[in-house]
Image (cartoon, rainbow, N blue to C red):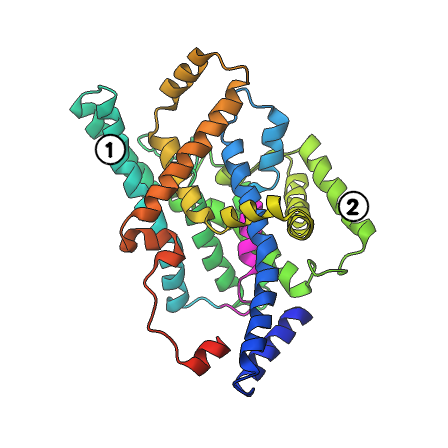
């Protein structure tokens, strides 16, 4: 842990010994510190989820370097940030597996269920026969069970990719692998072996179900996030400005001459350049998010809010990608003859649809919406006055 976190932990322990008058003030300071630390990560996550949607427009006429920019950091950022907030001494046990199953596998299953139900309905609405809709339901159900984010030759012939929510499966496995590695004397070596194995395994020859191979590779980014936190590298003044310049230049170089990091299939087109570039890009974006928060709040606040709901946004993005008739929508947009590039129109349409679907998801009964929105979960009984002050 860095010194700031140690001070915060000490303050939390000391709060219980303060007078009733002193406790609210200390609690407020703790909340302010916690918010300060969280804001910049939420802003970075908000920026990354936008990059995910933009990156998925590849092939619509969008500039390829814009796509390379998005793929140079977006998925590694999510894994690195997740690792940053992992407990340094986390170990693999039944409770840890259950906790991650609830937070990752349950949203995966519910999102897959939306796809399996809505996909055939879209087929029926477009005039396809019932038999074709039933076949599509079976195909989508099998895709959800296999859990691959991309169509690879190493998959069984009858299986297609479920798409973007491979991330939830990969994050589950990465957390499990890292917790297991923490129980050894050399967790870093175990993580490196997992990454190399994932890199060397050819997905066109063999691609394991449930995004296990993607999770093996993602473990490295989770571990790096944890080490960044432990070393306090994102604390103010921890890194010399000239070194930050080198980090930014490295990221820019990886975008210009790399940007082929496809974690979904374990493909790192430019090898070490893509890996190092994604780490540098993540660090730069988090620091940039801090600057936005302090000097451009009108821009930072929407990104922060978006960053707090990346799970439902991500899942609804998968649903609209899998079930919405984008081919038909593209034809209709072209017919309008708008004086803007097609990919810009599609980007606006994607974001508008995601916003509507996320709002609908919020309005669903709490047993469903609470899976995606923590604020929708039923709260426990109120704490006593003393406990509330300490909390």
Answer left or right for 221 relative to 251: left
Picture quarter containing residue 164? Answer: top left
Please tell me which of labels 2 and 1 falls first in the chain: 1
Which residue is located at x 24 percent, y 30 percent?
120
* Crowd around label 2: few <14 · some 14–19 · many ≥20 (10 Å): few
The stretch of residues the image draws in magenta is: 75-90
- Residue 42 seen from this side: yes
Q: Secondary structure at mark 2?
A: helix
Q: Position of residue 231 (x, y in %)?
A: 68, 64
In this orientation, which residue lies closer to the viewer: 386 or 166?
386
Q: Secondary structure at mark 1?
A: helix
Which image quarter is the N terminus in? bottom right
330 in relation to 255, above or below = above
Picture quarter containing residue 7? Answer: bottom right
Q: Magenta: predominant secondary structure element?
A: helix
Residue at numbered disc 1: 137
Q: Position of residue 169 (x, y in %)?
A: 41, 48
Q: Position of residue 377 (x, y in %)?
A: 34, 60
Residue at numbered disc 2: 246
Which residue is located at x 50 percent, y 46 percent?
306
The Cα–Cα distance between marks 2 and 1, rounded to whole angstroms, is 50 Å
- Residue 148 seen from this side: no
Q: Position of residue 22 (x, y in %)?
A: 57, 83
């Amino acid at each position: 842990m860095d010194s700031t976190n140690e001070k915060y932990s000490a303050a939390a322990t000391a709060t219980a010994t303060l007078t009733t008058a002193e406790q609210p003030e200390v609690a407020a300071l703790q909340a302010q510190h916690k918010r300060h630390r969280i804001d910049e990560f939420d802003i970075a996550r908000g920026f990354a989820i936008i990059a995910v949607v933009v990156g998925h427009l590849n092939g619509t006429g969008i500039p390829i370097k814009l796509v390379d920019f998005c793929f140079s950091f977006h998925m590694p950022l999510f894994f690195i940030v997740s690792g940053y907030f992992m407990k340094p001494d986390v170990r693999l046990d039944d409770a840890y597996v259950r906790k991650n199953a609830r937070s990752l596998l349950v949203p995966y299953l519910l999102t897959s269920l939306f796809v399996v139900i809505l996909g055939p309905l879209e087929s029926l609405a477009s005039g396809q026969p019932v038999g074709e809709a039933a076949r599509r339901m079976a195909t989508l159900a099998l895709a959800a069970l296999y859990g691959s984010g991309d169509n690879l030759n190493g998959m069984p012939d009858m299986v297609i990719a479920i798409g973007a929510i491979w991330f939830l499966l990969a994050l589950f496995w990465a957390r499990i692998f890292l917790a297991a590695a923490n129980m050894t004397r050399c967790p870093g070596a175990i993580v490196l072996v997992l990454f190399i194995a994932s890199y060397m395994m050819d997905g066109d020859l063999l691609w394991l179900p449930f995004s296990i191979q993607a999770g093996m590779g993602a473990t490295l980014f989770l571990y790096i996030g944890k080490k960044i936190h432990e070393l306090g590298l994102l604390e103010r003044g921890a890194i010399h400005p000239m070194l930050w310049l080198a980090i930014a230049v490295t990221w820019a170089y990886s975008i210009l001459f790399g940007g082929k990091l496809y974690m979904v299939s374990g493909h790192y087109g430019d090898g070490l350049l893509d890996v190092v570039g994604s780490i540098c890009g993540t660090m730069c974006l988090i620091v940039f998010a801090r600057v936005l928060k302090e000097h451009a709040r009108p821009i930072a606040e929407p990104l922060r809010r978006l960053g707090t709901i990346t799970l439902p946004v991500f899942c609804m993005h998968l649903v609209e990608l899998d079930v919405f008739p984008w081919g038909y929508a593209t034809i209709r947009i072209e017919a309008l003859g708008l004086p803007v590039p097609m990919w810009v129109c599609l980007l606006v349409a994607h974001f508008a649809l995601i916003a509507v679907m996320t709002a609908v998801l919020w309005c669903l009964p709490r047993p469903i919406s609470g899976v995606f929105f923590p604020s929708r979960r039923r709260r426990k009984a109120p704490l006593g006055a003393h406990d509330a002050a300490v909390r």
